[in-house]
Image: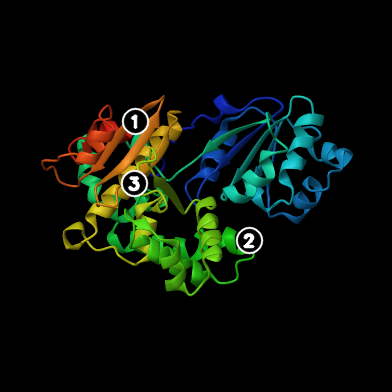
Amino acid sequence: MKSHFNRIYEPLDAYLEPSRVLVIYGPRRVGKTTLLNAFLDQTTLKYKFDTGDDIHVQQVLSSSDISLINEYCRGYELIVIDEAQYVPAIGKGLKIIVDHVPGIRVIATGSSSFDLSNKLGEPLVGRQRILKLFPLSVLELLQHNNRVEIQQQLPALLIFGMYPEVLRKEGHDKKALYLVELVNAYLLKDILALENVKSPKVLLDLLRLLAYQVGSEVSLNELANALKLDVKTVGRYLDLLEKSFIIFSLGGFSRNLRNEITSKRKYYFYDTGIRNAVINAFNPLELRNDIGSLWENFLVVERLKKKTYQLIFSNDFFWRTYAQQEIDLIEEREGKLFAYEFKWKSRSYKPPKAWLKNYPEAAVLMITQDNFFDFVS
């Protein structure tokens, strides 16, 4: 694999504007700093680069002192704050910069949306552009490999995922070790540091339960009972895990038919390698009993990457009835419904009768290894 992968947002120049903040966020270790450094290496702008965990930077940007912040920016055309989520009230500080330093450009990166979005959102209304960066996508791999080569790599992508560093490493053990260390050392760092959650063990136990239920509806009550926590606490932890880009969820689709399930959610991991690291499952596909779940997680997240990068807007759901009829993914786009069923191996498929009866205008497309490229790229 290559040592450097071109990312979908390169070059960053296209997204940078005077008197606006460019916000880049996403999971840890997906390449935000690498993307940033590649831009800074070639920019002609005079820039200042700082990190949000620097105490001096925190003091200045959270001070709300216009003269102090002006002095901090003096002489620069671009201000860059990496890991901006560690700066208290970062949104107010950045608002002062773009409002009071004429023509200044600002880039802020962060690995947790709960802190960045909450603190940036209101102060920076109309003053920001947001880019969400994921682990590598099939869309990006196609810049380096053809479809046949990616098809050959598919088992490894399902097992080890799409983190840039994982794709650069050679060998089963090195990939697995990196992922396990990533889970233990980095992924929960923001939640533990910023949200005052005292026990990483509880979060890991919760992630393990979700890892075994990928592709299935999840009951908060069942999770709470298994973890010996109250339902509100479990709901809060799930929200934090979503906002720190470890998992995301889909709700049930319904047009108020009484037999459709809407009270539960499905949870997916942003990366299948992380999912497997959480449960220490790196065995080959032919020895696994969870290929269907892995394939579903892979396709749902690759589809999410494609829609984010190509600005395709949709409401996403799963569909299931109490009679156990189900469809993996429903997209509601431009007033129309699109339904997708995921199968690792090609086979004959008949859409559920209840779906065909109630939503005759929405055909169901089966996505397999044979036709997935058009779905995700």
Asked whether the residues under the numbered discs 3 and 2 touch, taking CB atoms below 8 Å apart as contact, a structural biologist would say no
- The quarter of the picture where the N terminus appears is top left
Kindly identify which residue carries mark 3.
260
Residue 184: % across, % down: 47, 66
2 or 351, which is in the foreground?
351
Kindly identify which residue carries mark 1.
337
Residue 77 drawn above or below residue 85? above
Residue 175: % across, % down: 34, 59
Horizontal side of residue 350 vs 62, given as left or right? left
Residues packed near mark 2 inside 10 Å, few (<14), some (14 to 19) or many (20 plus): few
Point 21% across, 38% down: residue = 366
User: Which image quadrant for residue 90?
Assistant: top right
Q: CA distance from mark 1 to mark 3?
A: 16 Å
Say which label, 1 or 3, has the lower sequence index: 3
324 or 302, which is in the foreground?
324
155 or 344, which is in the foreground?
344
Q: CA distance from mark 1 to mark 2?
A: 38 Å
User: Which image quadrant for residue 316?
Assistant: top left
**Residue type at the position of mark 2:** Glu
**Residue type at the position of mark 1:** Leu
Horizontal side of residue 114 vs 266, given as left or right? right
Residue 18 seen anywhere in this rendered image of the structure? yes
> At numbered mark 3, what does the secondary structure look like: helix, strand or loop?
loop
Kindly identify which residue carries mark 2.
195
Q: CA distance from mark 3 to mark 2?
A: 36 Å
- For discs 3 and 2, the disc positioned in front in the rendered view: 3
Outermost residue, front side: 258
Residue 315: % across, % down: 43, 36
Point 25% across, 29% down: residue = 360
